[in-house]
Amino acid sequence: MCGIFGIYRVSEASKYIYFGLYSLQHRGQEGAGIAVFNGQKIKYWKNLGLVSEVFKENILKELSGEIGIGHVRYSTTGLPVIQNVQPFCVNFAKKTLALAHNGNLVNAYQIRTELEEEGHIFQTTMDSEVIMHLIVKHLKEGLVSAISKAMYQIRGAYSVLLLYNDTLVAFRDPWGFRPLALGILNGGYVISSETCAFDLISAQYLRDIEPGEILVIDQKGIHSFFPFKETHFKLSHCIFEFIYFARPDSLIFKKNVYLVRKNLGYNLYKECPLEADLVMPFPDSGNYAAIGYAQASGLPLEFGVIRNHYIGRTFIEPSEKIRDFSVKVKLNPVKELIKGKEVIIIDDSLVRGTTCRNRLKSIKEAGAKKIHFLLSCPPIKHPCFFGIDFPSASELIASKHSVEEIRKFLDINTLYYLSIEGLLEAVGELKDKVCLACFNGEYPIEVDYSFRKDIIEV
Amino acid sequence: MCGIFGIYRVSEASKYIYFGLYSLQHRGQEGAGIAVFNGQKIKYWKNLGLVSEVFKENILKELSGEIGIGHVRYSTTGLPVIQNVQPFCVNFAKKTLALAHNGNLVNAYQIRTELEEEGHIFQTTMDSEVIMHLIVKHLKEGLVSAISKAMYQIRGAYSVLLLYNDTLVAFRDPWGFRPLALGILNGGYVISSETCAFDLISAQYLRDIEPGEILVIDQKGIHSFFPFKETHFKLSHCIFEFIYFARPDSLIFKKNVYLVRKNLGYNLYKECPLEADLVMPFPDSGNYAAIGYAQASGLPLEFGVIRNHYIGRTFIEPSEKIRDFSVKVKLNPVKELIKGKEVIIIDDSLVRGTTCRNRLKSIKEAGAKKIHFLLSCPPIKHPCFFGIDFPSASELIASKHSVEEIRKFLDINTLYYLSIEGLLEAVGELKDKVCLACFNGEYPIEVDYSFRKDIIEV
Amino acid sequence: MCGIFGIYRVSEASKYIYFGLYSLQHRGQEGAGIAVFNGQKIKYWKNLGLVSEVFKENILKELSGEIGIGHVRYSTTGLPVIQNVQPFCVNFAKKTLALAHNGNLVNAYQIRTELEEEGHIFQTTMDSEVIMHLIVKHLKEGLVSAISKAMYQIRGAYSVLLLYNDTLVAFRDPWGFRPLALGILNGGYVISSETCAFDLISAQYLRDIEPGEILVIDQKGIHSFFPFKETHFKLSHCIFEFIYFARPDSLIFKKNVYLVRKNLGYNLYKECPLEADLVMPFPDSGNYAAIGYAQASGLPLEFGVIRNHYIGRTFIEPSEKIRDFSVKVKLNPVKELIKGKEVIIIDDSLVRGTTCRNRLKSIKEAGAKKIHFLLSCPPIKHPCFFGIDFPSASELIASKHSVEEIRKFLDINTLYYLSIEGLLEAVGELKDKVCLACFNGEYPIEVDYSFRKDIIEV
Amino acid sequence: MCGIFGIYRVSEASKYIYFGLYSLQHRGQEGAGIAVFNGQKIKYWKNLGLVSEVFKENILKELSGEIGIGHVRYSTTGLPVIQNVQPFCVNFAKKTLALAHNGNLVNAYQIRTELEEEGHIFQTTMDSEVIMHLIVKHLKEGLVSAISKAMYQIRGAYSVLLLYNDTLVAFRDPWGFRPLALGILNGGYVISSETCAFDLISAQYLRDIEPGEILVIDQKGIHSFFPFKETHFKLSHCIFEFIYFARPDSLIFKKNVYLVRKNLGYNLYKECPLEADLVMPFPDSGNYAAIGYAQASGLPLEFGVIRNHYIGRTFIEPSEKIRDFSVKVKLNPVKELIKGKEVIIIDDSLVRGTTCRNRLKSIKEAGAKKIHFLLSCPPIKHPCFFGIDFPSASELIASKHSVEEIRKFLDINTLYYLSIEGLLEAVGELKDKVCLACFNGEYPIEVDYSFRKDIIEV
């Protein structure tokens, strides 16, 4: 997962991009970058680290200009690959392009192999590089035509920002997997993965970049192109953006995330109305569904675990084993609240199950009489090929185990997953327009299961 | 405000102190220090910064030993004074002492002047240095006697940990201003400002160090002394620890903080039962009282503003003025939730009023129809001389202005402060044992209003 | 200028590369990188900064393997471009290549334009990327053939290390511009820009990679190829490596740098035998020629200026103007030595002349009666197209001004430049094999004067 | 060893002190501090680290004022003790003092014990704290009287700067162990351990603070006091300042260090005139004596080992043993120069002998036929009680071993130490005014051999 942010004709563009990326930091903490057109050429700066670590006042000053794009990149395991930090910048016959991409292609590998046979070479493991090659290949025919041809070839999730000298382009896959919103600011334009970035800089939300749309902003104004004439693409907004990924104060796919999450909690109660002493979230992931469940049930909501806000990146480990140390260092149960109580705990999702099991164990050790654990999404059984960084199927606990087996593994009284129906009901009018592949395995685009990302990793 | 933590006869003492201080980090972020007796002498390390910044694995290894104390120090404005970071360590005729102090004395300046006239010199601006001088002065008469004599002279708030070679001592002022709790761990002892530190390291809470008690832990065991024979001291637990300062998962003065805060919210409803669309806290300070108000009222609780978790220490400022930037960079209102609604906002306290006014303004700009702002404590009108770092009276908004004037300044529909009665009712059996001076000016000890801390500042 | 280092079949390859790069740090301080083949794929790590800043113990551990290459990159002005840090790594149809390059091509831009017309895209401003594209283009014909074809096309200076899975290749331009040496270590091989890197790790120098040679080291052994059948290439070793760039303890082009520099001083005396009280170098650049001059003349050598070893990267500037501050902060004249004396000062070269003028001024202010300033190289009048980062001709003081004009500008008694003959004599048998273009404008390869590097800069 | 620097009535005092300390950095790298009187009170900042690390532009700005002092502290083993970083600041009855001290007292422990019996407490292990206590004790009698009384009591080496509100005082022990020089700058005054600090800021050297002098600079001007009426103090300038410690471009004890060192080399030749192929120093410590030896002998001077300038603080170690790694990482022999040669190596001193042995071994391995190792000082047999941080006698190689034994240990052909006569001859008119205790054990003040510094270490 990543976050992207673009700006057109706003003075001190690099500072606004900085603030925008800062608002999107939850979408990626591994690396950050900004590219700005300074009137003559594109200058950029990027590196591993948080936005506030990568950029300092003097660097933003060097990145002078009024048009630019930025990117935050998600964390991976192992050594982070500095080459993969975006924006991805290339020179092409005295012209320069910079590209920031959120999403994942399913046929990047095939296209890449074909391009390599034509003599192209690749320096990163990013799908984004494939998109860039395709655009450049056709650039002589004009920018919109080149992007269109690229879009005809690539399949998968892509919300893309492209800087081509003083032209800013946004385009989005026809399935609409990842969000992308357009706003106005001081007579200029801003584009962001999520609208929470608009709020910080006091920009106004205008509309979404539509699935399949190419939006060009240049000196002549703002132009919209729809290269796909057919309309057979099934809209497939990533429902996991609502469940977990996006910030609750954002509008994505034109709906507020907070309200959807609350609906998930409502529906959870409709499906699984339990009696208990209290409802509590695992913070902050379960907060909003817990609100919904509590309001629907009339049960009291409590903050049964307290989060330590001073967790740094590196933390000294105890040499001797301290019970539940790794859990308690982040989340400490409020014993006086939990002791002797029957508690309903709400969380947004369960992936591997191991961290969660430790958390639940610490609740039990705090004295809970009974634990009912409710999840505001259905069992995640299938990997995502469109940008959510789930582990492989074999590591997804729900892929191999029944709900009852998982309940036993978690060692709790009740385990309940929201149904797919309950999930869909929560997104209202979008219910036919979402991707549910991680739950039901019905991928909106054919995917190659044998594909493993790391094969081509440098 | 500060946090202190001590340990006796637990292997890898410095690591446990590190974890303890880490749990107490909310009590002070300016500096941290650890002193450990290594069998022969006391070694220590301290510096400006967060616990995780000041200590690294190799430093903790150098601080080998089984007995030690630690301290976290609060933030001040201006250049932080490195000399004031504790523990405070001295040599005295081949013996070494280390002292960690939480609280503030009201007669430190007088004692200091007297000591200076006797030829003593002072290197810091800490009250703690005065305590140390007094103890050392009488040390020949024995440790307990020396501490007793010091306690007879000093007046004010002091929860102190003292390391004297391989002896660990804890002592607390007879008014009981600041908390101090005793626990056991693997056959050894731990002492902490708050019990949340016990939870992290799986220690068991035993009891509080009592007001006026000197607790000595040495090779012969654990010994308790009560130097004050009289019983005329009015117990004066700092009620602000409950309102704002302590962590909600802690037990202080033998009561859980979370439950007290929730009671404050209950009582707020009893006193000020409003109709509205929703109840929301300013996070995280208002969370627990908001829970109480919502449960009492039956109104829905919502998280109307979202907190950005990636705020770093330094943040680049916008050059142009962005509306409410400094508020929104930390807290962003969820417009879809607030727009057109009548909202009750709960916070724990109002000091100067300026930050709060900006926060409320951002709620209004998010579209709130009516704003009712409720505070879970009475108006703060008087400075604290016992360790809470309020500004001077002239900067306390409630000191000069009526509630109605403040309401107009904040530009909201309703402003309500919890009454002193409502506050006392929330702490139950402690209601006669708390200090209310910041609300009613009735200082449990006579204070010198003309005293200004910075006069003696180096 | 850059430094490169490679290793084949030595356990803990990344550590040895680290030490090798550390020895080559004087060849580039802007960035550093290491790529290692771990048995399955190539992993790499690179970033801006000194070798000791970019690499930490844990990173070297992640770069496990026995075969690898590394690179240090020189400093530029403005924002350093992270993308340009080498090794340069690409994926090509499941194979991975990594390349480290020292030197500069003169026809990179033309080739690049042609490649772009074929659809290739470029992400950096490095010539190295052009070499990589050409190799990959022909890789199907076999590695040696592909490299040969690349070498047929490119013109200019290139000493290159290439890692292709578990094969290590070194190749060098037929003019032999930049040095490259082969050594053995524990039964494996090492290749380095300079032999000083061999000394540190106790490797034995074997021989140079020859001009025009492709040296392949793989499981079958070590193989040498010479793709150019013709022998019309004029050997053109960069004489500036001897004058200034290489470390004095290195062997380059099979000659020790220290001894050559000393010869330069000898010859300087032969051409310009002056009387004076003492001979002194500007440290450390003039040290070795000063030794030569002193020995030839019999005049006493003195260290007339003392270097401060604690210069950091950033230094606080005085607000008020302090006389010669920027000079004295690095080099302080020893007044007692200089006062009233007639001094001969030796330095290795004069580029812009401004820094030098300030240094000479500080010598005069220290009381020198007469200053004779002697340079151990001829006037630098022409830019270098082969890797030395001279400024453009207009900034080279000797390009526009006569020796007498420069002497007046420097405000000294004597200014003397070593003659080209004196320079050639100092390198002995290499005298017909060196490039003198920066002195006489006779470029061994035709260059395009209109070419400006920054045109294609991203 | 330490360095001190003071300034009176110069605008931006803290910046000048910063530059002064920067010039004195060679006298101490563990910590640095600056205290400035801002018109009302003394503000200070100090921490562990180099001057350039401890101070940033913003901190210097906070330290506004025209009068101030600074200190750099030497490196010790183990955890550096932050409390010991100077200036040492105290409050005394609304007045504040700051003190910076270079030197070591021999009766600090006794005085301290007495003061402790009077009730004084000590927070550091610095002698400086004892001086401060004594001054404060008598301060009521007036500043000069108080300092005089302190000087009557303390014995040992002390060059001290004292800031007492807006008065700057310098005083120096009557034996004159450590240097201290007075200069003028822009109508104000500067005082420094060495005059190299004056050069950087373009101050003019005026005179030395005399042994036994108290120099007071205040609003009324500059006043000199000599509290010791007797004249029986034997002048005892530390000769090791000339041999090793001070910067060669400094004037100390009114003599230039460089010229003294060169004399040492001359005398070394007079005493030990050897035939050989070349003379070389171990850089940079042996540079100046090597110059002297070479000039006296007529033998060629060469730089036989090259120093790596990029040594950082932490350096990754090889896992496998690389021969002479720790030597070569700093100093690499120039094999081409040394191979088959008979070499005379000059160094300034030999303490433990182990590092030196490794260095000599690397010279032999580079192919030297014969090695003659000459030291520009006599054998160091006795510890220093006056501020040079030699190890205890048992670790001083010359304390237990004859010259012949040391020669065998070093495994070289010749080992020669300069005689005491040769040493004295080199300092000319100062020859009756130096301390030779480390060579001949004749301490100018009675010392207590049983005293061990670390006994009182916290």
Image (spheres, coloured by chain):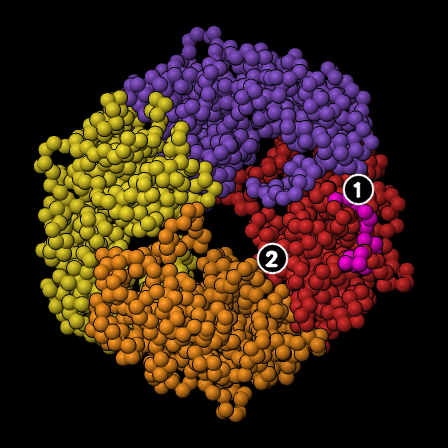
Chain colours: A yellow, B orange, C purple, D red
In front of the other: A444 or D58: D58
Task: Give above or below for A9 relative to A308.
Answer: above
Q: Give the number of marks.
A: 2
Q: State left or right for residue D286 relative to residue A388.
A: right
Asked if labels 2 and 1 touch by Cβ distance under 8 angstroms, the answer is no
Disc 1 versus disc 2: nearer the observer: 2
- Residue B149 among magenta residues: no
Residue at 55% x, 80% y is B447
Which residue is label 1 attached to?
Answer: D256
Residue at 50% x, 41% y is C52
Residue at 47% x, 29% y is C4
Instruction: Specify the subunit that label 1 lies on.
Output: D
Q: State left or right for residue A144 relative to residue D246.
A: left
Q: State left or right for residue B89 relative to residue A139.
A: right
Q: CA distance from mark 1 to mark 2?
A: 33 Å
In front of the other: A420 or C154: A420
Labels 1 and 2 positioned on one and the same chain: yes
Q: Could you tell me if residue C184 is visible in this image?
A: no
The span shown in magenta is: D203-221
In front of the other: A285 or C172: A285
Provide residue C138's location: percent of width, then percent of height: 31, 19
Label 1 neighbour load within 10 Å: few <14, some 14-19, many 20+: many
Provide residue C232's location: percent of width, then percent of height: 47, 7
Which residue is label 2 attached to?
Answer: D45
